[in-house]
Amino acid sequence: MPVAAVNGIRLHYNDIGSGEPVVMVMGSAGSGRIWHTHQVPALKAAGYRVITFDNRGIPPTDECAEGFSIGDLVADTAGLIEHLGLGPVRLVGTSMGAWVVQELALQRPELVRAAILMASRGRSDALRAALARAEIALYDSGVELPPRYRAVVQAMHSLSPHTLSDEQAAIDWLDLFEIAHGHLDHAPGVRAQMALEPMPDRLAAYSGIRVPCHVISFADDLMTPPQHGRELADVIPGASFHVIRRAGHYGYLECPETVNESILEFFADGWKGAA
């Protein structure tokens, strides 16, 4: 896994395929390798060069446990694009990663050809802000929750009821989440990422984005409901909007074929900006 020295840190990345570059930005507590399950193969098969990376806070990229800002993550992403001699590039971000992409599109438009914003929003609300603060308080309390309990809560927060109604799928997801929690529960970099929330209101600022954007929301997403994505798309000039049914916050893993189709169609002819 190559390493780039950018923005004062060591950032680990993968660079696969050839063609026009697509840079993918993962959400909080997630490795860039997650994209390789479904999205990277589809983009590579479509003729794109795909760059994924581990955000600041996620090993083996520097964890920066002392804390950092969303601006640091934006600068890291810009630094990687410049390190590789790319730009403008197509960008795909989900959740926190979409926040990074939105800010990059606003601050460094010369680096962005087009942007996919998945499971995203332009502001927090009372419930999500309370959840963010509660998760930080739980982490800081040092309370050790049973891994299986944490896995069940994550499944109910992040997956569609349609997925969880499938007995075998539910068992498989619970096993996966339990393993993942054991790896990252006490990672100091994850705690630093948690401190980025709650998200401030950036809707007015995003009206200044001038690069083509496509917002993808998931119909059963409890963390960033579709109305948040619709609100975001409405303030970005010309942005298109797509709601994917039977999917929760991890819709790119639950409904990968539909997500990949939406990404590829926008990249192919998404300059129209029709919502």
Image (cartoon, grey):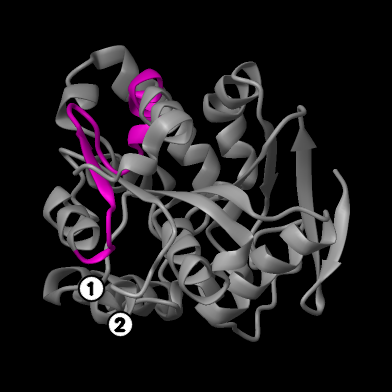
Image quarter in which the N terminus is found: top right
Query: Is residue 252 one of those drawn in magenta?
Result: yes
**Label 2's element?**
loop
Q: x, y percentage for residue 185?
A: 53, 59
The front one of 50 and 221 is 50
Q: Residue at x 57, y 57 (%)?
A: 112
Q: x, y percentage for residue 232?
A: 23, 61
Query: Is residue 246 one of those drawn in magenta?
Result: yes
Instruction: Give the Cα separation between the discs numbered 2 and 1.
Output: 6 Å
Q: Residue at x 32, y 72 (%)?
A: 206
Q: Which residue is mark 2?
A: 200
Crowd around label 1: few <14 · some 14–19 · many ≥20 (10 Å): some
Q: x, y percentage for residue 94?
A: 43, 50
Residue extending farthest to the bottom is: 66
Proximity of marks 2 and 1: CB atoms separated by less than 8 Å: yes
**Label 1's element?**
loop
Q: Is residue 163 left or right of residue 66?
A: left
Labels 2 and 1: the sequence-earlier one? 1
Q: Which residue is mark 1?
A: 124
Q: Which residues are magenta?
A: 235-259
The front one of 72 and 160 is 72
